Image (cartoon, rainbow, N blue to C red):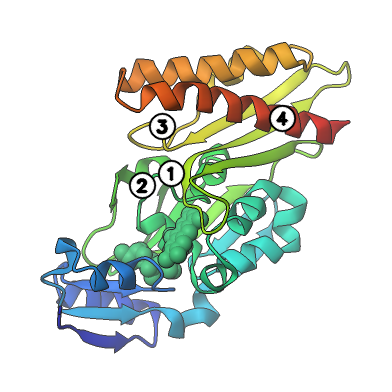
Amino acid sequence: MFKYDYYRAGTLDEVSEILARHQGKARIVAGGTDIMVQIREKDKRWEDLECLLDLTFLESELRYIREEGNQIHIGALSTHTDLERSEIIKKWIPFLGKAASTVGSPQIRNRGTIGGSICNASPAADPLTPLIALEAKVVIHGKAGEREMGLKEFYLSQGKVDLNEDEFLKEFVVEKLPEGAVTEFVKLGRRKALAISRLNVSVVLMLDKEGSISYARIAPGCIFRTPDRVETAEELLIGKKPSEELWKEAGKEVSDEMIRRTGIRWSTEYKQPAVEAIVEDALAQAAEMIG
Ligand SMILES: Cc1cc2nc3c(=O)[nH]c(=O)nc-3n(C[C@H](O)[C@H](O)[C@H](O)COP(=O)(O)OP(=O)(O)OC[C@H]3O[C@@H](n4cnc5c(N)ncnc54)[C@H](O)[C@@H]3O)c2cc1C
C-alpha cells in the first residue's frame, strides 16, 4: 500500500507552490478515474508519491467552457459530461462532445475531466483526436506565470506531457471551425460498454459552393507514437467531390502513413484494415451531414 498525504489548494498559485515544494513527488488528482486506479494497482510510477493534490476545490477557476471571439476556452476541470452537454461545443466543435459522450460510463463521464484525460497521456484517450484535429493549444500554470503551447507538442510520449515540477494544465484553447464545417468522431473499442478505444478518428469536412472539398482534417488515434493529423490524406481530399471512392483512398493513405511512420508490427494485420475502415466511415458519416 502506498502512503501519501492529501492536500487541497485554495488558489492556482498555491497549487504550483505545493507542486514545487514536493519536487516531482506531488501529483494532482482531478476526477481520479485514472490515477486512483493506478495507485490501487501499485503502479511503480507512484511508489515515491508524497502527496496527492486535489484540484476539485478550484472548480470556480478551472471548470468552464466559454466563447471568446473566435476561440473556445475549456477549463481543465470540465468533465466529459460538461463537454457532452455544452451548447457551445455542440454548435462549433460537435465531435469533441461526441468523443466525450463515448468515454466509459455515466459515472466515469461525471467524474473524469478533460485535463486528466490529456495529462494521463494515454494514446487511447477519446478527447485527444478532436483536440488534435482542432490544433488545440494548452495553457499551463506555474510559479513563473502562464505559458501556452500546442497540444501536439505538449504530448511528449505515452504517459508523459510537457509539465515542469511546479506546473499544471489550466485550460485548452481552440479556434471555432468555419461555419458550414461538419465533424465526426468514430471509435472502435474492444466491446460496446466501457470500451477504451483501440482505434479512433476525428474528421472535419467542408465543401465550397461548387460542392468540392475545401477544408479537411483527419486525426487518427492510437496509431502513431504521438498524436497527429495525416496531412497527406487531408490534401488528397481538397478540391475533389465527395465520393465513396475518395473516402476509401483517404483511408488507405492514413494506413500507408501509419506504416511509413511505425513500420510493420504484430498489430499491423489487424490495424491496417481497421484504420482504413474507420477513416472511410467517419468521412462518409461527416459527408452525410452536409447533405
Ligand atoms: C472504467 C473506466 C472506463 C474508462 N473509459 C474510458 C474511455 O472510454 N475513454 C477514455 O478516453 N478514457 C476512459 N477512461 C479513462 C479516464 O476516465 C479518463 O482518462 C479521464 O478523463 C481522466 O480524468 P480524471 O479527471 O479522472 O483524471 P485523474 O485520474 O484525476 O488524473 C489523471 C492524470 O492526469 C493528471 N492530471 C489531472 N488533471 C491535471 C491537470 N489539470 N494538470 C496536470 N495534471 C493533471 C493526474 O496527476 C494524473 O496523472 C476510463 C476509466 C475507467 C476507470
Question: Separation of disc 4 and disc 2 at Cα?
Answer: 26 Å
Q: Which residue is mark 1?
A: 150
Q: Residue at x 37, y 65 (%)?
A: 34
In the rendered view, tell whether residue 14 sits above or below residue 247: below
Identified by mark 2, the residue type is Phe
Q: Which residue is mark 4?
A: 205
Q: Secondary structure at mark 3?
A: loop
Tell me if mark 3 has few (under 14), some (14-19) or many (20+) residues whose alpha carbon lies within 10 angstroms of its own.
many
Q: Which residue is mark 3?
A: 223
- Splitting the image into 4 quarters, where does residue 43 fall? bottom left
Which is nearer the eye, 83 or 209? 83
Identified by mark 1, the residue type is Gly
User: As drawn, is 137 to the left or to the right of 251?
Assistant: left
* For marks 1 and 4 on the same chain, the one whose residue lies earlier in the sequence: 1
| Tag nearer the camera, 3 or 1 | 3
* For marks 3 and 1 on the same chain, the one whose residue lies earlier in the sequence: 1
* For marks 4 and 2 on the same chain, the one whose residue lies earlier in the sequence: 2
Which is nearer the eye, 155 or 184? 184
- Splitting the image into 4 quarters, where does residue 201 fall? top right
Q: Which residue is mark 2?
A: 154
Identified by mark 4, the residue type is Leu
Question: Separation of disc 1 and disc 2 at Cα?
Answer: 6 Å
Tell me if mark 4 has few (under 14), some (14-19) or many (20+) residues whose alpha carbon lies within 10 angstroms of its own.
many
